[in-house]
Amino acid sequence: MRRRSKIYAGLAAAIVPVTSVIMALSGTPASAALGGSGPYPADYETSTTLANHTIFRPQTLPSERLPIVVWGNGGCSANGLSQGNFLREIASHGFLAIANGAPNGSGSTTSQMLTQSIDWAVAENSRQGSKYYNKIDTSKVAVAGFSCGGLEAYAVSNDPRVTTTGIFSSGLLNDADDYQLRRLTKPIAYFVGGPSDIAYPNAMDDWGKLPAGLPAFMGNLNVGHGGTYDQTNGGEFGRVATLYFKWRLKGDTTAGRNFVGADCGLCRSQWSVQQKNLTLDDGTPPTTPPPTTPPPTTPPPTGTPGCTAVYSVQDQWNGGFVANVSVTAGTTALTGWRVTLTLPGGASVSSLWNGVSSGTSGTITVANQSYNGRLAAGQATSFGFQGTGTGSGATASCTGS
């Protein structure tokens, strides 16, 4: 059961960091914002083709292409400078970082604005005449956010262009939203302010519910919910976030060693660290090599590996539902599985995670993804989906291989 905090819910809906208020009063011009500790001093700008956003970039674009980091602010604030020191630091290391909200803007933002940022960057990279023409690495995209902005990041983390997700002092507020965890397929990292952080219980609850096999990092620094974003260059959160993005978006394994292994760089610091399925190369866990062909004198195994599928409705509302299917291997290990799912009349699948589906209504089949098909005897995994109609009454059966 998720521990929900009314105080945290209020923060996620309304918090405006002190730095944003200071910046709003000062009205600092873009020309004065140059900074960051990286090799490419960074500035911020706006674009008439991306309204209500703030774009942080190296002042002089480097020859290397810029990976994309799109950011949701604390409190879902529409002030794009809310975490300006932090984002400028990231940009100075050769990233294009785009925050929701205009500089010194007011009001609130939505998760769709993160998608707009990705759309804009992809379009500018291909538009002849743009300063960003062929300057952006559109194959490397991080979606991230602080507090309420982290909820925005969760909401769009299933965009197929996203290659990693960063959750900063945030966590889902309701168990009904856990489908956003079950549909995760790309590496994720959490950076939280320790037990004194109001979002800590929610973040840790999310951590415990991540899909089996998903590469994930959890770092806690005991500074509370506000983090270090308003410190010079974003403080410790700015340093560590930059290292994470250099690893995930630029393939920098030296940076990656701060996150991977029992002797990782952050493991030997003031951070409290947890890891799941992390490797340095591409972030995907190693797979078990296929068994070698047995010698002729060894009889081949007989029978078909068995598995069971248990269907349950996680949430139901007028016109829609979220369901989960738990798949468990029998007494024989599996190299793959396939579930046959018969939906009740009038029900259909609108989105599905942690499986590969065929069909959307009536009788459909769902096969394993590449990362959750191999199960030891008795081991379980799951997939889930959101549907329209009524979820009760569906049946599920499983075939293993």
Image: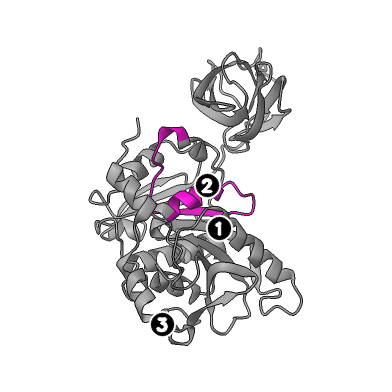
- Give the number of callouts: 3
The image quadrant where one finds the N terminus is: top left
Q: Is residue 18 above or below residue 278?
A: below
Mark closer to the observer (3, 2): 3
Q: Which residue is mark 1?
A: 114
Q: Residues within 10 Å of mark 1 (few under 14, many from 20)?
A: many
Question: Looking at the picture, which amino acid does disc 1 mark?
Answer: Leu
Residue sitting nearer the eye, 17 or 67: 17
Q: Residue at x 66, y 74 (%)?
A: 135
Furthest-right residue in this view: 128
Residue 147 percent coordinates (x, y):
38, 54
Q: Is residue 165 magenta?
A: yes
Mark closer to the observer (1, 3): 3
Please tell me whether mark 3 sits on a helix, a strand or a loop: loop
Q: Residue at x 54, y 83 (%)?
A: 59
Residue 25 percent coordinates (x, y):
35, 77
Q: Which residue is mark 2?
A: 155
Which quadrant would residue 162 be assigned to in this image? Answer: bottom right
- Res. 28 mark: 3
Please tell me whether mark 2 sits on a helix, a strand or a loop: helix
**Would residue 59 be found to the left or right of residue 197 on screen?**
right
Residue sitting nearer the eye, 88 or 303: 88
Which segment did they paint magenta? 149-176
Residue 2 percent coordinates (x, y):
35, 34
Q: Residue at x 52, y 28 (%)?
A: 381
